[in-house]
């Protein structure tokens, strides 16, 4: 018989394993971009769709998250999403062409989007007294899954001599997450979301401020996922070596996503910590832009820690704005929705910049400018004003 403490521990493990499955499908693409292009005939801008399409879906579905949960309920939404992720990964084993590969990215992106729209409110409700550390764990495992994708995909491809196998192998952890979630996810009463609240939130400046901060930072992540490995392969690095570089970045993301929320747990004003992550991003992007082959692992550790820590802290900041888990989840869904729509543009823009300039330098400089813009925007995230900047009732 499972005790309450054991159930609690297994719910923590479920959160971790679900988070682990939300990024490998994207980070596995970069190290394998050359065999994928050879096998499908996709050009660079078409390859960018493998990141852009899922990010767009993450944005659109995040807006629709409350409506989906009002129909299916939180638990069924998450389980359905994990099943969709499994399906998309399995279909990558039989990819006949580039269009079908993009379709699998859309399928997996749909599942990931449904999870991301549902999980924050569940974590806030079930772990209200440990919100920072639990959101840190979720974010860290999400980033760790990115490292898993970058590391394992080239290895499996090398062993099997088939890039399709390298991409489809991530169905295995998705199946494990589905099984664990099916047994340990809580069964709350079906929540009826007040959809007009979403409309009210969209009319408020704070919602759009959070969207801009989240979107511009995740634009850096989506560009890195799509183009870091190809950028270093253009400098003569192998697929495995560039995949290892990506893994260092994502492991640094995971470490920062886990550690920084814990360190900031005693102070609701997280602007100093977010500012630290932005400085690390500036250092990393500057290294990529101007001296990419000098101390590349240092640039990856700095950039990864900056991106991962900033992601986790923003996920906590948005939940801090509202006490009610359902309303906080709505605000989080809107931040992610608009943010991911904004972030989806970044890898495509870098592909365009590459076509115009023949390299990635201009794209990395563009991200430096975006980080500087966010550093100005976060000044407004003063927690003493949270109760004043979000109003849930019509005037």
Image (cartoon, rainbow, N blue to C red):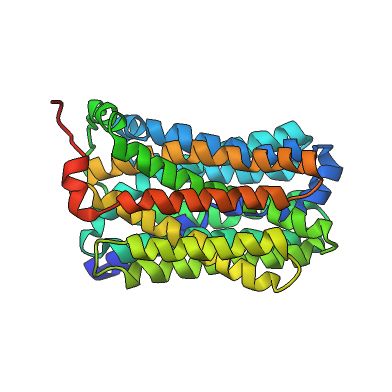
Does any portion of residue 16 appear in the rendered image? no
Task: Report the residue at 45% width, 41% height from top.
Answer: 339
User: Quadrant location of residue 348?
Assistant: top right
Q: Is residue 264 above or below residue 321?
A: below
Residue name at image x 47 percent, y 48 percent: 373
Near-viewer residue (177 or 203): 203
Q: Nearer the viewer, residue 115 or 214?
A: 214
Quadrant location, the N terminus = bottom left
Horizontal placement of 115 versus 146: left or right? left
- In the rendered image, residue 55, in percent from the top left (x then y), is placed at 55, 40
In the figure, is residue 131 to the left or right of 339? left
Residue at 81%, 58% (x, y): give it: 233
Picture quadrant where residue 390 is located: top left
Q: Position of residue 379 (x, y in %)?
A: 34, 53
Query: Which quadrant would the C terminus be assigned to in this image?
Result: top left
Whether residue 216 is visible, yes or no, is yes
In this rendering, position of residue 6 left or right of residue 179: left
Residue 18 in the image: above or below residue 98? below
In-front residue for pair 166/323? 323
Q: Residue 20 placed where, x, y %?
A: 50, 59
How many labels were placed on the picture? 0
The one nearer the camera, 151 or 56, is: 56
Residue 249 image offset from top left, x and y in percent: 60, 65
At x 82% / y 64%, what residue is drawn? 237
């Amino acid at each position: 018989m499972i005790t309450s403490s054991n159930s609690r521990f297994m719910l923590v493990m479920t959160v971790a394993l679900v988070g682990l499955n939300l990024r490998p499908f994207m980070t596995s693409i970069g190290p394998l971009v050359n065999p994928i292009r050879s096998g499908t005939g996709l050009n660079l801008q078409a390859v960018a769709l493998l990141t852009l399409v899922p990010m767009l879906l993450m944005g659109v579905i995040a807006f629709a998250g409350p409506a989906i949960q009002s129909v299916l309920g939180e638990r069924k939404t998450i389980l359905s999403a994990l099943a969709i992720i499994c399906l998309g990964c399995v279909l990558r084993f039989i990819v006949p062409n580039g269009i079908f590969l993009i379709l699998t990215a859309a399928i997996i992106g749909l599942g990931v989007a449904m999870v991301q729209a549902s999980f924050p409110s569940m974590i806030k409700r079930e772990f209200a007294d440990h919100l920072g550390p639990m959101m840190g764990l979720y974010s860290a495992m999400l980033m760790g899954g990115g490292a898993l994708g970058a590391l394992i995909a080239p290895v499996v491809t090398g062993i099997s001599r088939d890039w399709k196998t390298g991409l489809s192998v991530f169905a295995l952890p998705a199946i494990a997450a589905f099984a664990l979630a099916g047994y340990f996810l809580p069964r709350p009463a079906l929540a009826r979301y007040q959809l007009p609240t979403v409309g009210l939130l969209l009319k408020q400046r704070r919602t759009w401020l959070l969207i801009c901060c989240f979107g511009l930072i995740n634009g850096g992540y989506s560009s890195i996922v799509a183009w870091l490995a190809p950028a270093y392969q253009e400098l003569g690095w192998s697929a495995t070596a560039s995949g290892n570089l990506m893994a260092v970045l994502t492991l640094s993301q995971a470490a920062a996503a886990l550690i920084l929320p814990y360190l900031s747990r005693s102070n609701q004003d997280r602007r100093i910590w977010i500012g630290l992550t932005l400085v690390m991003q500036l250092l990393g992007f500057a290294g990529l832009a101007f001296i990419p082959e000098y101390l590349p692992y240092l640039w990856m550790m700095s950039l990864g820690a900056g991106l991962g820590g900033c992601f986790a802290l923003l996920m906590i900041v948005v939940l801090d704005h509202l006490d009610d888990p359902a309303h906080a989840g709505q605000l989080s869904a809107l931040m992610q929705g608009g943010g991911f729509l904004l972030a989806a543009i970044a890898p495509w823009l870098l592909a365009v910049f590459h076509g115009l300039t023949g390299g990635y330098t201009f794209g990395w400089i563009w991200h430096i400018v975006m980080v500087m813009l966010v550093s100005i925007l976060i000044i407004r995230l003063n927690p003493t004003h949270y109760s004043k900047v979000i109003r849930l009732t019509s005037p």
